[in-house]
Amino acid sequence: MGYATLLAPCAVCKRVFSSNPLKVPSVKNEPVCQTCMEAVNLARLAKGLPAFIIARDAYEPCREEELP
């Protein structure tokens, strides 16, 4: 049994980060890091908008069996 992780630059801040390729939040199919998603959610909440739901394991590796 192996694991898979996505290493990619964040669509917002451009820093490379690791994530679950199936669950990481994205903008136009570009992944967004946890730090940027937290900032976006804080801004949304301050405007009275609901926070985006982020999968608990969005920034963890996934089992290779889960990949399509």
Image: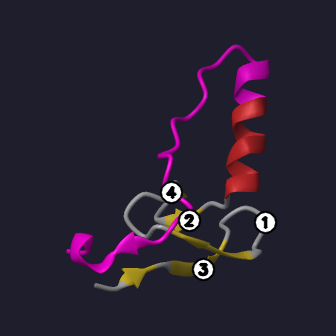
Q: Callout 3, which amino acid?
A: Ala
Q: Earlier in the sequence, mark 3 or mark 2?
A: 3
* Cβ atoms under marks 3 and 1 closer than 8 Å: no
Q: Which residue is mark 3?
A: 8
Mark number, residue 31: 2
Viewer-nearest residue: 61 or 52: 61
Viewer-nearest residue: 63 or 26: 63
Label 1 to label 4, Cα distance in Å?
18 Å
Label 3 to label 1, Cα distance in Å?
11 Å
The quadrant in which residue 46 appears is top right
Viewer-nearest residue: 61 or 37: 61
**Callout 2: SS:** strand
In x, y percent, where is residue 59? 56, 62
Mark number, residue 13: 1
Q: Which residue is mark 4?
A: 58
Label 4 to label 3, Cα distance in Å?
13 Å
Q: Which residues are magenta?
A: 43-68
The quadrant in which residue 35 appears is bottom right
Q: Callout 1, which amino acid?
A: Cys
Q: Residue at x 52, y 43 (%)?
A: 54
In x, y percent, where is residue 50? 59, 21
Q: Earlier in the sequence, mark 3 or mark 1?
A: 3
Q: Callout 4, which amino acid?
A: Ala
Q: Callout 2, which amino acid?
A: Pro
- Residue 65 lies within the magenta run: yes
Q: Quadrant of the C terminus?
A: bottom left
Q: Residue at x 28, y 84 (%)?
A: 1
